[in-house]
Amino acid sequence: MANTQAPFGFRQYSGIGTTPTFEQVVMKIASTNSTPIFFGDAVVPVTGSVTGYIQQATAGTVALAGIFIGCKYLSVAQKRTVWSNYWPGSDANGDVEAYVISDPNAVFLVQGGNAALGLSAVGQNIQLVVGTGNTATGVSGMYVQGTGTTATLPFRVVGLKTDPPGVNGTDTTTAYNYVLVQFNNSLTRANGAQTGIS
């Protein structure tokens, strides 16, 4: 059965943490950051004049800060604290408290792009694609494609999702199949250069 394109970002599949917080840490989003960040989006540190904050990652070789899984902020419109699974890009009075999974041992489930990712992809590094997040559900539209050996690509493929058979994403012979990835180029890697699997 051919897979259907329905990206959902990076969904935690396993790790060494436990519920309910797993390996999440608190980071900050500037209230002036007008780019939405969705549940399951990869995020990177902000560079330039506004440091210490995170923003939505784009395809590239910047070391990742982690995977965004929600936030809390004081809403200007609602005049109360709001907990949300995505940052809409406005409406915060002051900094936004972001919850991010940054653990280097975390494994994430993610959809592949327009080419099937088979066994030959396992062990290869892979690039992210931003896609389009869903403002109704707050879920990310990120997916991955373009495997290679470039050490600064953000993720590494560590497995394929093949069960249960017949379910969307489990056909490894067609495009849009699901793969398991870990951070490859992230701030939490312990190899000093912040590139490649340590």
Image: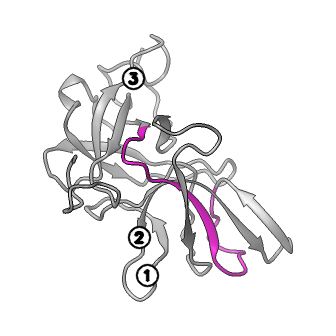
SS at mark 1? loop
Q: Of callouts 1 and 2, which one flags the residue occurring earlier in the amino acid sequence?
A: 2
In whole angstroms, how far apart are the C-alphas of marks 1 and 2? 7 Å
Q: Amino acid at mark 1?
A: Thr
Residue 98 is one of the magenta-drawn residues: yes
Mark 3 neighbour density, 10 Å: few (under 14) some (14–19) many (20 or more): some
Q: Main secondary structure of the magenta part?
A: loop
Mark 2 neighbour density, 10 Å: few (under 14) some (14–19) many (20 or more): many
Rendered location of residue 37, percent (x, y): 55, 61
SS at mark 2? strand
Rendered location of residue 170, percent (x, y): 41, 20
Residue 148 is one of the magenta-drawn residues: no
Farthest residue, direction left: 149
Q: Amino acid at mark 3?
A: Lys
Q: Amino acid at mark 2?
A: Pro
Farthest residue, direction bottom: 49
- State the residue at coordinates (45%, 10%): 165
- The relative height of residue 56 versus residue 158 in the rendered view (above or below) is below
Q: Which mark is residue 51?
A: 1
Q: Nearer the viewer, mark 3 or mark 2?
A: 2
**Label 2 belongs to which residue?**
45
Q: Are marks 1 and 2 in contact (CB under 8 Å)?
A: yes
- The relative height of residue 141 versus residue 97 in the rendered view (above or below) is above
**Label 3 belongs to which residue?**
161
* Pick the front one: 3 or 190: 190
* Pick the front one: 178 or 101: 101
Q: Which residues are magenta?
A: 86-107
Q: Of callouts 1 and 3, which one flags the residue occurring earlier in the amino acid sequence?
A: 1
In whole angstroms, how far apart are the C-alphas of marks 1 and 3? 37 Å
Rendered location of residue 179, percent (x, y): 36, 31
Q: Of callouts 3 and 2, which one flags the residue occurring earlier in the amino acid sequence?
A: 2
SS at mark 3? loop
